[in-house]
Amino acid sequence: MANTQETAIVAAAAQSIGVAPISRPTTAEQRLRELGLTLPAPVEPLGTYVEAVQTGNLLFLSGVLPTEGGAAKVSGRVGGEVDVEAGRSAAHFAALNVLAVVRQHLGSLDKVSRIVRLVVSVATLGDVRDQPKVADAASELLQAVFGKDKNPCRSVYGVASLPLGVPVELEVIFEVAP
């Protein structure tokens, strides 16, 4: 609270004398708070693997699902049991799980220097072509937290089925600051 009040006072004082206030870069952890987002508990592996592996300055995340407590938060295929908006909600929740795993592994989201790659698999039925719209929900959340300058390259695939019957799975590679 004091930082917010202090920032407002400094900005008002600077404006009153015609000087642009000095802006401090906002960190990922600060943006997360400003967005009012609370991360879920980090997901646990559903099999014989780990959720994250760091080698050098790269952090690889296993396929992250929209789950809570090991159960699917949303299930079904886009174009079947799930519409695009529900698919977007699933992608958003999966991205929150990504952030929770990253924070657990690194101790802070501020240690991420770049999102290198985002792969989004979307379970679809029939002739659905809205996979990018579903994937955008994950991309939008990651951009809101890390900033546009850290946007990754991205691939989006339509698939027939995903684990636990969820509509979305995210794979992410992060670059970590030394």
Image: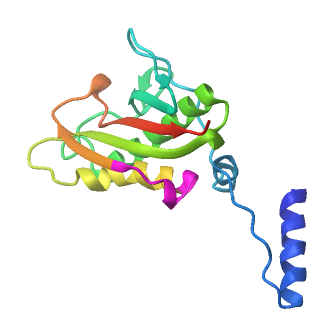
Q: Nearer the viewer, residue 176 or 134?
A: 176
Verify whether residue 161 appears in magenta: no
| Identity of the residue drawn at 67% across and 46% down | 29
Give, as a single range, the part of the protein colored magenta.
144-153
Count of numbered badges drawn on the protein: 0
Which quadrant: the N terminus? bottom right
Write down the quadrant of residue 20 in the picture.
Answer: bottom right
Write down the quadrant of residue 61 in the picture.
Answer: top left
Q: Position of residue 106 (x, y in %)?
A: 62, 30
Is residue 71 shown left or right of residue 31?
left
Is residue 15 shown left or right of residue 141?
right
Magenta span main SS? helix
Q: Position of residue 69 (x, y in %)?
A: 51, 22
| Identity of the residue drawn at 75% across and 69% down | 23
> In this orientation, does residue 150 appear?
yes
Q: Is residue 6 above or below residue 19?
A: above
Furthest toward the left, the residue is 127
| Identity of the residue drawn at 9% across and 49% down | 127
Q: Position of residue 28 (x, y in %)?
A: 63, 49
> In this orientation, does residue 38 appear?
no
Q: Nearer the viewer, residue 19 or 81?
A: 19
Q: Is residue 141 above or below residue 169?
A: below
